Image (cartoon, grey):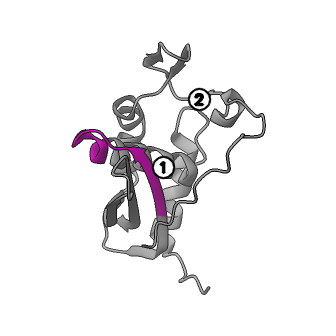
Amino acid sequence: MEIEAIPKSIALAINNVMLDIKSPLKKDKKNKFQDFDYTSIDGFLEQVHPTCAKHGLIIVQHEKKCALSDDKKTLMVTYDFILCHKDGDTWSHGIQKHIAVPYSAATALGIAQSYTLKQFMRSLFQIATGEQDELDKLDQRKPENKPKEVNFDD
């Protein structure tokens, strides 16, 4: 896979955002079920957006594909991310993220969009959240049943 060169203005903006972000982010919500504090999408955007704007970085999240699983219980979405600079440069070498969320109402699409955007920015800017890795909180025993494979390309 060949990756197009990142425009200098975008690389500089990403670097400047990384330098300016206060890490770890402030936690503004509590998960009462699993008993941990976290940074909500609104809290995340309140802390990251002004720094992106200050350095002229614009993140465009484009929904490329959306589908329900065969049993209609899981929403699967694929997003492309395009980075733009206020001066007009763009970089869209194929930054793509996939997510699968439980589907029970129309809000599932908003949940998918918010969580994917948050995780994309967390990765792009290498933002520490002070949270324990989610996998560390899960039961690590071998599952009794083989998990069903999810195909995002169908």
83, 97: nearer the viewer: 97
Vertical order, 126 against 83 (above or below): above
Where in the figure is residue 108, as x and y percent of width and height? 30, 43
The amino acid type, in three-letter code, at marker 1 is Met
Q: Could you give the CA–CA distance between mark 1 and mark 2, rounded to whole angstroms?
A: 14 Å
119, 152: nearer the viewer: 152
The quarter of the rendered structure image containing the N terminus is bottom right
Residue at image position (32%, 62%) is 66
User: What residue does disc 1 label?
Assistant: 121
Mark 2 neighbour density, 10 Å: few (under 14) some (14–19) many (20 or more): few
Q: Is residue 117 left or right of residue 34?
A: left
Residue 68 placement: quadrant: bottom left
25, 1: nearer the viewer: 1
The amino acid type, in three-letter code, at marker 2 is Pro
Marks 1 and 2, the one that precedes in the sequence: 2
44, 65: nearer the viewer: 65
Where in the figure is residue 47, as x and y percent of width and height? 41, 33
Q: Which residues are magenta?
A: 97-110
Query: Which secondary structure, mark 2?
Result: loop
